[in-house]
Amino acid sequence: MSILINKDTKLIVQGITGGQGQFHTSQMIEYGTNVVAGVTPGKGGMETLGVPVFDTVKEAKEATGANTSVIYVPAAFAADGIIEAVDAELDLVVCITEGIPVMDMMRVKNYMVGKKTKLIGPNCPGLISPGESKVGILPARIHQKGHIGVISRSGTLTYEAVDQLTKAGLGQSTAVGIGGDPIKGMGFIDVLKELKEDPDTYAVVMIGEIGGSGEEDAAEWIRDNMKDKPVAAFITGRTAPAGKRMGHAGAIISGGKGTAAGKVATLTECGVKVAPTPDMIGETLIEAIKEAGIYEKCLVK
Amino acid sequence: MKIHEYQAKELFAKYNVTTQEGYVAQTKEEAIEAAKKLGSEMYVVKAQAHCGGRGKAGGVKLARSIEEVGAVAEKIIGMRIVNKQTGAEGKLVRKVLVTDAVNIKKEFYLSLAIDNENAAIVIIASGAGGTEIEEIAANQPELIVKQLVRPTIGIKDYQARYVANKIGIAKANVKEFIVMLKNMYKLFVEKDCSLVEVNPLVETEEGKLIAIDGKVNFDDNATFRHPDILELRDVFEENPKEYEAGQHDLNYVSLDGSIGCMVNGAGLAMATMDIIHAFGGEPANFLDVGGSATTERVTAAFKLLSDPSVKAILVNIFGGIVKCDVIAEGIVIAAKEVGLNVPLVVRLDGTNVEKGKSILKESGLKIYACDDLRSAAKKAVEMAR
C-alpha cells in the first residue's frame, strides 16, 4: 500500500510537449508510472513518447479514465492548469511549477474549497510510491519500497533524507514533497492523515523549514493522533537571518514568527524526535522506531 | 520587490488614496525647487531609502522655510541609516521627499497584506498609528483590528465600516475612509502587491484623512505581468551581489561568515548553512543554484562566491534533476576564470555523479572531494580556520 498514488494511478501530464514535460514524462514512464495522456492546448490529436495528446484535461480524462494529473506548465499559466484539473474532477493534481504569483494561488485555494480534487504543490518535487508510481521530478534511483512515509517542504532535502533511509536499509511507503510556497495544496497534517490510515506505513519522517506555522500545527496533531506511528523530524534554517527570504517564497522569518527554534521546541514538546543536523535525519528516525520496538519490522528484507 | 515612499505615494495618487503633495529630490538645489513648487508654510523633508526607522535615525525633519528645506536636505542626502533592519553597514540615503507638513490630530495604522494560512487578503488596522505594527502587536494586541477579504469576493463596504468604527475614525470621515480602503485594495489586487501600508494615516486638525507615509511591496513572482512596476525598481537599494544573482536566476543571500556555499535546492542550502554552523563554522552566504542549473548559471554562481571574506568554499549538490557533470563543468570553468585561491570542498551525489567526479579530477584543480554531507561540512569548517 501507499498513499495518494499507486500502481492503479492513471496520469495526465499537463504541459507534456514542453522541455520539462518531455524530460520528466520519459523519466516517469521509465519508472513504470502509467502515463495515459498529455495535455497541451492546440496540440490535441498528436502523440508524443507514445502518449496521446489532448487539448483539454476534461477530454483527456473522458478518453482515458485518468484520475491524476501533473503540471509542468510555465508559472503564468499554472494556476489555470490547476483549476482545469479541478473542474475535470480528477482525484489528485500535482503542480511542479515554481514561481506562481501569490494572488493566483490564493484564488485557486479559495476555488478549491468543497471540491473533490486534492492538490500537491506548487513549487514541489511531486511524490513517489516506490515500486508503484512516480509523479513529479524526484530521482527514482535513491528510493526503495518500504514502510517509512516521508513529507517535506523541500525537494533536495527530501532526497537527502530518502537517501539516508535507503542506505540504512529502510524503504519508503510514499515520499511527498508538499512544496515551498506559502499558499499551497495539501499541508503536513493533510498528508499525515493519509499516512496514519495507510496500513503499510509504520513511521514517518517530516522535514520542515522556517516560515509559517505548518510544523507547529502538525506537531500538535501528531501528539494527539499519531500515538501508534513514531514521527521523526528535521527543521532547516536554524541559522537563517530574520526578514530574508531563503529561496522558497514561504521560507522567511517575519515579526519573530516562524523560527526554526520555535518549531523544534514545539515538535519536541509534542514527543517528536528532531534531528539536530541534516546528516542525522536517518539516525533520528532509527532511534524513534527502535524506541517504539518496530525497527526490525521496518527494515527492508 | 520594494519601492520608495515617494513611488508608493505616486501609486496612491493614481488610485485616489489621498496623500499630500510632494516632490523627490537628489540634491539640495532640487529640494529647494521642490519647496518652491509647494509654496507652503511648513515642510517635511524625508529620507528615501528601503528601510524603516528613518525618523528615529534623523532622516525625517521639519523645515519652516525654503532655505531650511535646502539645509535639511543637504544633511539628509548622503547620510547612512543604521538600525536593526539595515544591519551594520546601514543604508545610504540618496534621495529625499519634500512634502507639505500637515496638522496631525490623530494617527492610525492601516494596511493590506497576505494571510497565507487563510489564503486571503487581510486588512490590519489600529488606532495606535505611527509606531511599528510589530510593536503594537507585541505590546497591545487588543488595539489591532483584522478583517479577512476573500479574493474571489473582494472587499465589502461593511468590512471597511467595521474597521473604521473599531479604530475610531471620526464619523464625518467614515465614508472617505471606506473609499480610501477600497482604493488601497484595488491597488493591492491590480498590481499583485504583497503589502500596501499606510502608517500613519492621519486625521488633520482640518478634519481631513491623509496618508502621510506609504509603503508598497510587490510579489516577485508577479512582476512579469507589471512592466510599469518593474520600472520602479531602484537597484542602488539592493545588495549588489543579490542583484547580480537575481540576473542569473540564482537565489542568493549575503551572510557574515567565511565559508562560501553553493547548493542545489533552497531547503538543502539552508541545511548546509545549519550543519556548517553546528561544526563551528559560519556560512558566508545562502546560494541555491536551482533545479535547472546550466553550466553558465553554475559559473555565475561560483563567481559570486569569490570574495575576500570567503576562506573556503563548500559545494553541496544532491543531483536529482541537476546533473553532477553539469555542475562539475561549471565549477571548472569558473575556477579557471576567476582563479581559485581558497580551499574547495565538493560533495557531489546523484545523477551522473561518476562523470562529475572525473571532470573535477581531470581538471587539475585542488579539490577536496567528499561523499557525504557530514564529512564535507567538517572539512570545509576545518579548511576555513
Image (cartoon, coloured by chain):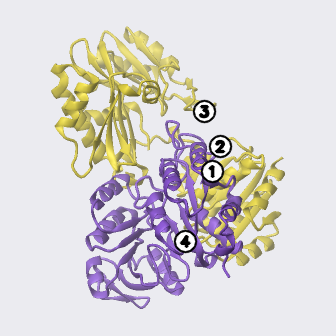
Chain colours: A purple, B yellow
Per the model, the C-alpha gap separating discs 1 and 3 is 17 Å
Q: Nearer the viewer, mark 2 or mark 4?
A: 4
Q: Check disc 2 and report the residue beneath it.
A: B255
Q: Check disc 1 and report the residue beneath it.
A: B286
On the image, the x and y values in percent for residue A209 come to: 56, 52
Q: Amino acid at mark 3?
A: Gly
Per the model, the C-alpha gap separating discs 2 and 4 is 40 Å
Q: Check disc 4 and report the residue beneath it.
A: A201
Q: Amino acid at mark 4?
A: Thr
Instruction: Give B336 or B4, whichever is nearer the viewer.
Output: B4
Per the model, the C-alpha gap separating discs 1 and 4 is 35 Å
Q: Nearer the viewer, mark 4 or mark 3?
A: 4
Per the model, the C-alpha gap separating discs 3 and 2 is 11 Å
On the image, the x and y values in percent for residue B242 come to: 57, 47
On the image, the x and y values in percent for residue A178 come to: 48, 62
Q: Earlier in the sequence, mark 1 or mark 3?
A: 3
Quick check: marks 1 and 3 in contact, CB under 8 Å?
no
Q: Earlier in the sequence, mark 1 or mark 2?
A: 2
Residue B338 in view (yes/no)? no
The answer for which chain carries disc 3 is B
- At horizontal 52% and vertical 44% (from top left) the residue drawn is A258
Instruction: Give A235 or B341, whichever is nearer the viewer.
Output: A235
The disc at residue B87 is 3
Q: Amino acid at mark 1?
A: Phe
- At horizontal 71% and vertical 62% (from top left) the residue drawn is A283
Pointer 4 local density, CA inside 10 Å: few below 14, some 14–19, many at least 20: many
Per the model, the C-alpha gap separating discs 1 and 2 is 7 Å
